[in-house]
Image (tube, rainbow, N blue to C red):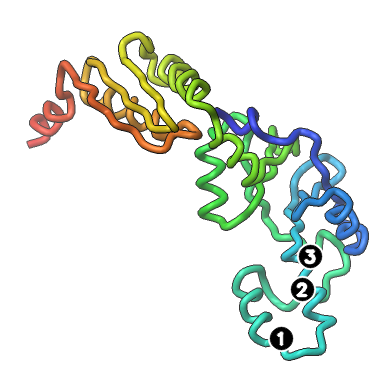
């Protein structure tokens, strides 16, 4: 499953020169926690989130916000953001983006590594959609039948293996796979492909191989 299969194509965005009040109104109106900031050519310059706007709240706060400030400073930037007046000045930049042909697993990894809740989706540098954590959660919620169908597609398109060469049983996201393939490397490839299909909870593999090509490579290197 790719990002293009789950992303939202009708994307709400703001221009870098948009006043912060207007940008905040967009977040509130559309009930989103962040929007891409794009220029007139549709290129993503950054992302403006509710967390970025918190700097303005801190600037207006009369209480002792030193602890809050230190936490947000480590997470989002420096005190200069509290002086921002436009979306371009307050946004987080550069934006972490993904292309529509990347896998859902790749998008999930980017979100975890960079600690973001959404990724602008770009093609040739221009915004075409957005994928959020909730989109990935919905992808993970595939039925067993959908998981089995996607595994079969992955075997054909990525590993060039006839799905009839292996037997699949999917129960509650747990995949049991058996059969005999040509070599050990292919078995490991298939097991890895299956584990990355959204909705797969575990892989119980009893796949065997006709030739241990890894052992032959090791022997040649000795």
In this rendered view, identify the residue nearer to me: 169 or 197. Answer: 169
Residue 207 appears left or right of 38: left
Give the mark, 2 or 1, whose residue is nearer the N terminus: 2
Q: Residues within 10 Å of mark 2 (few under 14, many from 20)?
A: many
Dividing the picture into quadrants, the one containing residue 7 is: top right
Q: Residue at x 84, y 81 (%)?
A: 60
Which secondary structure, mark 3?
helix
Q: Residue at x 54, y 36 (%)?
A: 140
Which is more N-terminal, label 3 or label 1? 1
Q: Is residue 118 above or below residue 52?
A: above
**C-alpha span from label 1 to label 3:** 19 Å
For the C terminus, the quadrant is: top left
| Disc 1 target residue | 65
- C-alpha distance separating marks 2 and 1: 11 Å
Task: Name the secondary structure under disc 2.
Answer: helix
Instruction: Residue 75 in the image: state x and y as whole percent.
Output: 61, 69
Q: Secondary structure at mark 1?
A: loop
5 left or right of 218 in image = right
Residue 87: x and y in percent read 83, 60
Q: Which mark is residue 82?
A: none
| Residue identifier under label 2 | 55
Q: In the rendered image of this protein, does residue 40 appear above or below residue 184?
A: below
Residue hosting label 3: 90
Report the residue at 62% width, 46% height from top: 133
Of the residues tagged 1 and 3, which is closer to the observer? Answer: 1
Q: Position of residue 208 (x, y in %)?
A: 19, 21
Label 2 and label 3: CA atoms lie apart by: 9 Å
Neighbours of disc 1 within 10 Å: few (<14), some (14-19), many (20+): few
Kindly report which numbered mark, 2 or 1, lies closer to the viewer in this rendering.
Answer: 1
Query: Residue 136 lies in what quarter of the image?
Result: top right
């Amino acid at each position: 499953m790719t990002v293009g299969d789950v992303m939202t194509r009708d994307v709400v965005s703001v221009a870098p020169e948009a006043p912060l009040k207007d940008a905040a109104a967009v977040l509130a109106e559309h009930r989103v926690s962040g929007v891409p900031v794009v220029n007139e050519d549709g290129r993503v310059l950054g992302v403006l989130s509710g967390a970025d706007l918190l700097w303005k709240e801190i600037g207006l706060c009369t209480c002792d916000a030193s602890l809050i400030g230190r936490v947000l400073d480590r997470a989002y930037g420096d005190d200069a953001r509290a002086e921002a007046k436009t979306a371009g000045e307050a946004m987080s930049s550069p934006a972490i983006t993904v292309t529509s042909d990347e896998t859902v697993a790749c998008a999930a990894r980017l979100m975890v590594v960079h600690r973001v809740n959404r990724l602008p989706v770009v093609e040739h540098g221009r915004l075409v959609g957005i994928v959020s954590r909730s989109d990935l959660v919905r992808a993970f919620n595939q039925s067993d039948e959908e998981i089995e169908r996607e595994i079969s597609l992955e075997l054909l398109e990525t590993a060039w293996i006839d799905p009839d060469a292996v037997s699949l049983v999917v129960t509650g996201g747990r995949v049991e796979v058996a059969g005999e393939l040509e070599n050990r490397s292919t078995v490991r490839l298939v097991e890895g492909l299956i584990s990355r299909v959204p909705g797969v909870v575990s892989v119980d593999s009893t796949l065997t191989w006709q030739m241990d090509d890894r052992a032959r490579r090791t022997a040649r290197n000795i």
